[in-house]
Amino acid sequence: MSGPPHRKRVTMAKPVSITISHDLGREAAVARLRGGLDRVRDRLGMVKMQLVEERWDGDTLHFGVAALGQTVGGRLDVGEDFVKVEVALPWLLAAFAEKIKLGVEKQGRILLDKPKV
């Protein structure tokens, strides 16, 4: 007699993609982002997040953030006139997707906007 088939628990992830335009050029945008990540780590919306991984590979940042007991990996690609952030939020954080997206966009614009003279 055999028992019930083993079932895997499937956790659906919500893909989130954010594109932020800039007019800095790739090199200056990378420099701004590298120098400014420390300032925005705790300002990404209503959910308290902690950056747990930060690895640059050329113009691409591979990152991991932890929030609400969940760890999320993602990547940030810097282009000549845009920055694209991609993450797949686990179901627990998916409820906060729009707030997180708005927080990332706001902080990204702060880092990428040219200072006013």
Image (cartoon, rainbow, N blue to C red):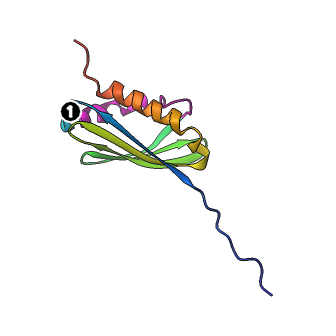
Query: Viewed as shown, does residue 86 lie left or right of 94?
Result: left
What residue appears at the point 47 percent right and 28 percent down from the top-left corner?
Answer: 43
Q: Which of 99 and 37 is in front in this view?
A: 99
Q: The residue under label 1 is which amino acid type? A: Ala
What residue appears at the point 61 percent right and 61 percent down from the top-left corner?
Answer: 10
What residue appears at the point 52 percent right and 33 percent down from the top-left corner?
Answer: 99
* Residue marked by disc 1: 28
Q: Which quadrant would residue 112 be assigned to in this image?
A: top left
**Residue range (magenta):** 29-48
Tell which residue pokes out farthest to the top in this image. 117
What is the total number of numbered labels drawn onto the structure image? 1
Local packing at callout 1 (Cα closer than 10 Å; few below 14, some 14-19, many 20+) is some
Label 1: which secondary element: helix
Query: Viewed as shown, does residue 68 lie left or right of 55?
Result: right
- Name the quarter where the N terminus is drawn: bottom right
Residue 47 horizontal/vertical position (percent):
56, 33
Judge whether residue 39 is colored magenta. yes
Residue 24 horizontal/vertical position (percent):
20, 30
What residue appears at the point 50 percent right and 48 percent down from the top-left corner?
Answer: 72
Question: Which secondary structure class fits the magenta region best?
Answer: helix
Tell which residue pokes out farthest to the bottom in this image. 1
Residue 15 horizontal/vertical position (percent):
47, 49
